[in-house]
Amino acid sequence: MSKWPAPAEMRVLQMLQDKPAGAYGLQIVEASEGMVKRGSVYVLLARLEDKGFVRVLPQKVTPENGGLPRPKYQLTADGARVLRTADAIGMVFA
Amino acid sequence: MSAKIDKDRVYWQANETIHPRGEEMDILANQLKGLDDDPEESAALDQLFLSDSAVCLNTATMAVETDTAGSVSAVKSKPKTDHRRVTVKFTLKTEPVKKAEPPGAPLTMLRHLMGKRSYQRIVKPHILDMRHEHAEAISVGEFRKARLIVFRGYVQVLWPLFYGTFSTLVALWKLAK
């Protein structure tokens, strides 16, 4: 399997680039404006996690999250490097 | 089970069972409040209730005073003579309570069908999102939206599973053909 992210995975990385503190899966779906679907976002995030471009932030059960610690995803340094490279060579993932 | 409340009074043990409901329960409660004035009686009643509740959850026994006719409603008047002690047994009938489960609880069974890692990374976040959205909708009183969220969550999780299984079976069938 190629480690270079697929176009759909690149879109997820781009969404995460705008959220340095991390984002929930649903926040990525909303920010993508329909480009990333609800049913596929966690599959894409799991693949990106396997490739080392995304990490899952540990979440604690707090009253703020309603006792439901949803996973929060953050871009890794490798993920940021991939985005910079894609930007340098002019790749478009619209 | 019984407890002596006052040794000086003449008590008569009646083996009759009364099922107090509604107002009768209030009368019994008022009578017990009256008995609280006497520390010995209070201690005896406390012991009675504590022992009953410890022995059986659904059945409690307590001692009350009644008139000669055995009417529980007469305990308010507290007749001066011919006191009898009647052991009143009542059963607290409770309706069967439906076990409350969070939305998407049946979906957690999928962890037995797939790998633990896949379940943790793909299915569980869907369930948590569904519960989060469901709780948000319930908190603002949008119950219809909450039901739709649960339905959508089930479709999101189960549809790829069914589709994947079906397409695999079709591929196998084509290979066999």
Image (tube, coloured by chain):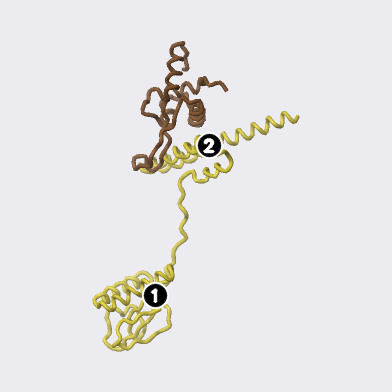
Q: Chain of mark 2?
A: B
Question: Neighbour class for label 1 at 10 Å: few (<14), some, many (≥20)?
Answer: many
Question: SS class of the residue under badge 2?
Answer: helix
Q: In the picture, residue B143 is in which quadrant? A: top left
Image chain in brown:
A
Residue that appears at 43% across and 28% down: A28
| Crowding at mark 2 (Cα within 10 Å: few <14, some 14-19, many 20+) | few
Relative image position of residue A64 (x, y in whole percent)? 34, 40
Q: What residue is at 60 percent from the left and 36 percent from the top?
A: B162
**Residue that label 1 marks:** B61
Amino acid found under the numbered disc labelled 1: Thr
- The x and y percentages for residue B68 are 34, 86
Indicate the chain on which mark 1 is placed: B
Rendered shade, chain B: yellow
Q: Farthest residue in the top direction?
A: A89
Give the alpha-carbon distance from disc 2 to disc 1, as whole Å. Answer: 55 Å
Give the amino acid type for the residue marked by disc 2 in the picture.
Arg
Image quarter in which the N terminus of chain B is found: bottom left
User: Which of the labelled discs sits on residue A88, or is there none?
Assistant: none
